[in-house]
Amino acid sequence: MKKLLLIIVVALVANAACAQRFDLGSNFNYAKPIGGMAHNIDQGFGITLEAAWLPKTAPFSVGIEFAYNGYGQETTRQTFTFDDGTVTETDVIVTNTFSNLYATGKYFLRNGKLINPYLSAKAGYSWYKTNLVIEDPEDEDGCKPLDSDKLLVDGTFTVSGGAGVRVDFSSLFKKTPANTLFFDLSAHITQGGTVEYMNVHEHSAPNQTPDSDVTTRFINNRTQVVHEHHVGHVYSSLAEMMEYRMGVVFRPSFPNR
């Protein structure tokens, strides 16, 4: 009896899975800050990974997405003089990034058609990070930095709304079922709370006053002497930007039962 119940449960779950639709996608991102953030960040580029569930024949989907974007990297050749008089010349690399983790929802206006526009809404959390790497001049392969550190990490809750369009191009590939491969193009506006972040450039806007300075202390691995180095400036503003994306969505095809 227990085995029979187990078989029935497995069969029901398998049948339910085949009755559902799932989207797996990846996009190239272009982010353009607006409002106060536009004074300190020029633009950002990155990628998005997303997964969504679509009830059978329903014109909507719900899912999750993760986006990772870089908005500036700068490498400068600098000379450091330590307290003991030793001098080191090496590269200092500062990288600025922001990432988003969202719950997502889409409503498709022409479900199942070749060209299918949709409305989109997202809500979640955004992180802004600045990393510093000071390369070791005696490490030829660059595998072991003289020092590395997360200079700044901050975040805020954000929401996003927009619209997009999907184009079914499954027919371009032989033996590929319809409605399984899509080209996706979308635009969103994102709004969030106040967040602190750094910029690659020392002063991003002539009239913009930074909230604070950032310095880092690191130890010369050979002499163990401590050196303090000024890295950049911290700004704060509301998280506001326009995001434009293009990518590909794959919808696995399950056999009909």
Image (spheres, rainbow, N blue to C red):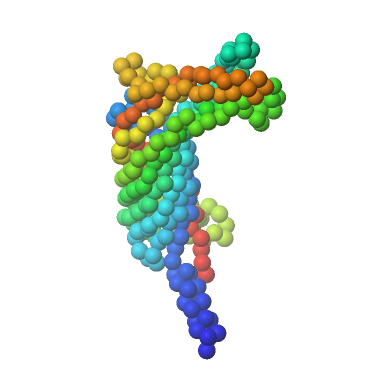
Is residue 230 something one can see in this rendering?
A: yes
The spot of residue 158 in percent (x, y) is 33, 43
Q: Does residue 248 lie above or below 240 as drawn?
A: below
Image quadrant where residue 223 sits: top right
Q: Residue 222: percent from the left, percent from the top?
A: 67, 22
Residue placed most toward the observer, 149 or 19: 149
- Taking depth in this image into account, of 224 and 148 the one nearest to the observer is 224
Left or right: 251, with 77 as reference point: left
Q: Is residue 30 visible?
A: no
Residue at left offset 45%, top offset 43%: 67
Q: Nearer the viewer, residue 198 or 217?
A: 217
Q: Is residue 129 above or below residue 117?
A: above
| Left or right placement of residue 49 versus residue 148 in this view | left
Residue at screen point 47% across, 22% down:
215
> What residue is at 50 percent from the left and 32 percent from the top?
150
Task: Give the camera-side residue of 72 and 16.
Answer: 72
* Residue 74 image point, x, y percent: 51, 23
In the rendered image, residue 248, in percent from the top left (x then y), is placed at: 48, 48
Residue at horizontal 39 percent and vertical 25 percent from the top: 234
